[in-house]
Amino acid sequence: MLLVERRKQMEDQEGTAFQQNIQARREANLIAAADEVGMDVSRRSDPGFADEVRRRWMEANKEAFASLNAYVEKHGLPLEKYRAF
């Protein structure tokens, strides 16, 4: 019984570490995107900061998205023949 409890405890710790790793990566990506669009990263704890970063990033990359969409409309998806769905 003790072995089962220890294994459960180890699995819980691994799950927590995994979640913390994901959160750290999200934070790093948010900071990089905010820096890319010229936002003050010291405001990252403000409500709505991530949404504003996302909005500004989408606006800054609007032309690239339009170009990609035009390419797909004209030529189709590059790897379309490999899609299984």
Image: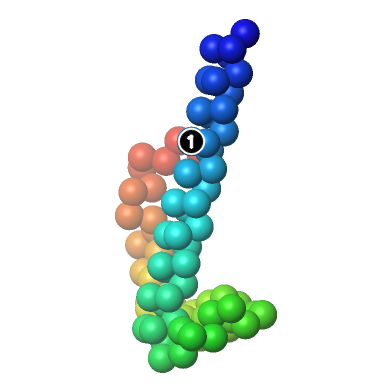
Q: Quadrant of the N terminus?
A: top right
Q: Is residue 30 visible?
A: yes
Relative depth, front residue between 83 and 11: 11
Residue at 42% over, 68% down: 29
Percent position of residue 44, x then y: 54, 80
Residue most extreme to the left: 78
Residue 70, located in which quarter of the rendered image? bottom left
Within-10-Å neighbours for mark 1: few <14, some 14–19, many 20+:
few
Residue 32, located in which quarter of the rendered image? bottom left
Kindly identify the amino acid type of the residue bearing the numbered disc 1: Glu
**Mark 1 lies on residue:** 14
Please give the count of numbered marks on the rendered protein. 1
Side of 75 where 56 appears, left or right: right
**In this picture, is 75 found above or below 56?**
above
Percent position of residue 12, x then y: 57, 33
Relative depth, front residue between 23 and 68: 23
Q: Is residue 70 visible?
A: no
Residue at 58% over, 23% down: 8
Residue most extreme to the top: 1
Residue most extreme to the front: 2
Relative depth, front residue between 85 and 39: 39
Side of 50 where 66 appears, left or right: left
Q: How was this image coloured?
A: rainbow
Residue at 36% over, 42% down: 81
Residue at 45% over, 60% down: 24
Secondary structure found at label 1: helix
**In this picture, is 83 found above or below 46?**
above
Side of 81 where 16 appears, left or right: right
Residue 45, located in which quarter of the rendered image? bottom right
Percent position of residue 69, x then y: 44, 70
